[in-house]
Amino acid sequence: MLAKQVFSSLVAVGLCASIGNAAMVLRYEFEAAPGNIVADISGSGTAKDLTLNNGASIVTDVERGNVLSLDGVNDYGSTAACTAGDKLDTQNSITMMGWINTTTTSRDTIASRSFGPGPFMELNTTGYANKATAHVGGPGLETYSTTSVNDESWHHLAMTYDASTLRIFVDGFEETSAPGSGRTDASQTLPFLVGALGQPTISRYFGGLIDDLRVYNTVLDENEIQAAMAAEPNVVPEPGSALLWFGILAFTFFIRRRRA
Ligand SMILES: [Ca+2]
Ligand SMILES: [Ca+2]
């Protein structure tokens, strides 16, 4: 009986893990002890850990626990070079999201997969009045938030692109979109960057704090984005998995009551 219960528990855990991580291909929570390497805790494929460069550091924030701190001068994080067909070669669907806290008034990139052909999220004051920008380089699309997000408080930014529409979400709500077509990017081998824009020259260094940065290889809708951002820092159930866990716990309780 005990073996059967253990097996059932393992199946449940495995089911949750696969559902919770099915679409997430990259995640940095910045909770590990300070150091130069930030673990990719997405649980998807080969981990793409992030190397912190030029003084980028992990600091403790009263609201969000450990977060990434960048100086806006030359700090950034980078993965190893990507390869065509790897888990970040998202091609026709992508969601990028993360929390930011900044007062920057320059054009700062929050996260990017290369320059030119790649997708990126940034704060953009070059003609867009402190608005956030979502960009996908394959079809050359951009769309901008209507809310300013450089007010020194935490904001959640998300961008999605499904090969037809680019959308930007601020604090869980869609603000603008732009129509387009084609891949998110040309297949390329440049690293994924946090806090800067990539090749040919690394630039647009972000000044401020970043937390819980994620990339999905599918498009999340507004409800799923809100579910992801609503979770407590450090204890973040993925969309769908929290409900599944509740169901499993309720079922286990029901069975135990019947046997008692
Ligand atoms: Ca964190
Ligand atoms: Ca520095």
Image (cartoon, rainbow, N blue to C red):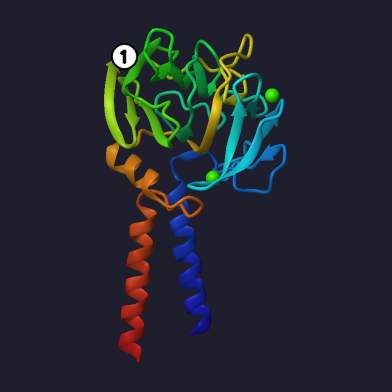
**Residue sitting nearer the eye, 62 or 70:** 62
> Where does the C terminus fall, quadrant-wise?
bottom left
- Which residue extends farthest bottom? 260
Picture quadrant where residue 256 is located: bottom left
Q: Position of residue 65 (x, y in %)?
A: 54, 48
127 with respect to 173 (left or right): right
**In the depicted structure, whether residue 199 falls above or below residue 22:** above
Q: Position of residue 36 (x, y in %)?
A: 72, 37
Q: Residue at x 56, y 17 (%)?
A: 197
Is residue 46 in sight in this rendering? yes
**In the depicted structure, whether residue 187 falls above or below residue 11:** above
Quadrant in which ligand 2 is drawn: top right
Query: How many marks are shown on the rendered structure?
Result: 1
Q: Position of residue 174 (x, y in %)?
A: 28, 30
Give the residue type that dot 1 points to: Gly
Q: Position of residue 72 (x, y in %)?
A: 59, 21
Q: Residue at x 33, y 81 (%)?
A: 255
89 with respect to 47 (left or right): left
Respond yes or no on whether mark 1 lies under 8 Å from ligand 1.
Answer: no
Q: Which residue is mark 1?
A: 180
Label 1 SS:
loop
Q: Residue at x 51, y 10 (%)?
A: 116
**Residue sitting nearer the eye, 175 or 103:** 103
Is residue 42 in sight in this rendering? no
Picture quadrant where residue 229 is located: top left
223 with respect to 114 (left or right): left
For disc 1, the neighbor class at 10 Å (few under 14, some 14 to 19, many from 20) is: some
